[in-house]
Image: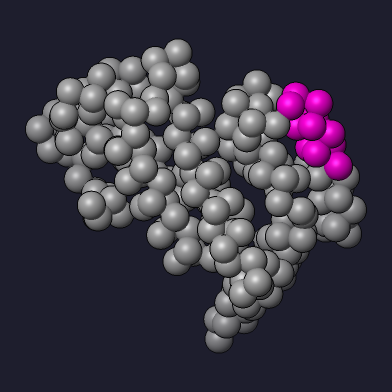
Amino acid sequence: MDIMGLTGQSKTKTGTLSNSSEELVERVQSGDKEAFHQVFERYGRPIISFIYDMVGHQDLAEDLTQETFVRAFKGFDKSFWAETKFSTWLFSIAKNVTRESLRTRRSKQNLTLEDAGADNFKDKQALPEGALLNKELNILIKQALANLDEDKRLVFTLQVFNHHSYEEIVEITGFSLGKVKTDLRRARAEMREKIRPYMESDL
């Protein structure tokens, strides 16, 4: 299944994304593939953003996003529980897919993001001072995020970038509430220290 190929196919039979997550899940479980197209349209962007923040490479993030939705499609009848918030369940799959990838690629993957950051400076035209500073800050944030250990990066990304509650992070990660709070506090402190020259407000 080419999940990434589903992008842009939301305007089909139903012509709407107004269905609730619960309604979409019920339709997918009944075999409605168009409902799964809508699931991807609704959650594809936050999932790929989350995975990119974890791995730091766009192509890899796209591959892992596709794997996430393939597993979700296969798991609707086997691993999805009605009492579980759908987005939490989906982020949990994304977390598992991402951590598996990081473990298998750890010896080869450069998580400093220096190559990704350097791409931002390849424009031949001179940038306005403000835009240049924004690009520098963006690179610095990516580098600081990549230098967090995996657990801290995970909880920081889920809470700060994806706005999940403590309870949702506990469910997605399987960590205890105490560990989530501790890792998040330490991650905030480390990130704040790294970007202090560029930011005055707290993360």
Query: Measuring 67% from the left and 44% from the top, which residue is drawn there?
Result: 154
Residue reaching furthest to the left? 13
Name the magenta segment's main secondary structure: helix
Q: Number of numbered discs present?
A: 0
Query: Measuring 61% from the left and 74% from the top, which residue is drawn there?
Result: 108
Q: Is residue 37 left or right of residue 20?
A: left
x and y percentages locating residue 161 in the rendered image: 63, 41
x and y percentages locating residue 43 in the rendered image: 40, 38
Residue 156 falls within the magenta-colored stretch: no
* In front of the other: 136 or 117: 117
x and y percentages locating residue 104 in the rendered image: 57, 63
Q: Is residue 156 left or right of residue 162?
A: right
- Quadrant where the C terminus sits is top right
Stretch in magenta: 176-186
Q: Is residue 154 left or right of residue 147?
A: left
Query: Measuring 48% from the left and 58% from the top, which residue is drawn there?
Result: 61
* In front of the other: 73 or 143: 73
x and y percentages locating residue 58 in the rendered image: 49, 64
